[in-house]
Amino acid sequence: MKNKITVEGVEYIFQKVTPREWLKIRERSKNKYGNSSQELLYTEVFEHVIISPKVGIDDFEEIETLEEVITAAINFQCKRQRKEEQKLSRHGQKELANMETGDGGQD
């Protein structure tokens, strides 16, 4: 499944990855202390979810634009997982939210 959005005149194309791959992305997006890392998550999303144009964190001049694109990509990816999220414990839901918003801690 694919989706297109336009942010500041640039069209971005997203693709959904499988639930297993999304879980792997979340695991790879943790720092050496097990805390979520925004930088690692964003890099993984650019590599696996945002398929066009091929850009990365350093291609953005404004953090607001970067976050708008990443948030849209994560929201697109996670729509398919809503039923799975409901099965998580309250702790699991909080951890998932922190991972997606980058509030899981610092290096």
Image (tube, rainbow, N blue to C red):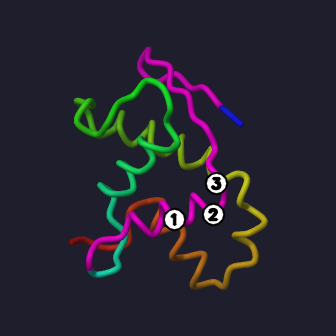
**Which dot, 3 or 2, sits closer to the camera?**
2
Screen quadrant of the C terminus: bottom left
Numbered disc in front, either 1 or 3: 1
Distance between the Cα atoms at labels 1 and 2?
6 Å
Q: How many marks?
A: 3
Classify residue 87 by image quadrant.
bottom right
Callout 3 amino acid? Cys
Q: Is residue 19 shown left or right of residue 48? A: right
Judging from the image, what secondary structure is the residue with disc 1 in? Answer: helix
Give residue 78's mark: 3
Q: Which residues are drawn in magenta?
A: 3-32
Amino acid carrying mark 1 in the image: Lys
Q: CA distance from mark 1 to mark 3?
A: 14 Å
- Expressed as whole percent of the image width and height from the top left, the position of residue 28 reads 40, 65
Question: Which numbered tag is attached to residue 24?
Answer: 1
> What kind of element bears circle 3?
helix
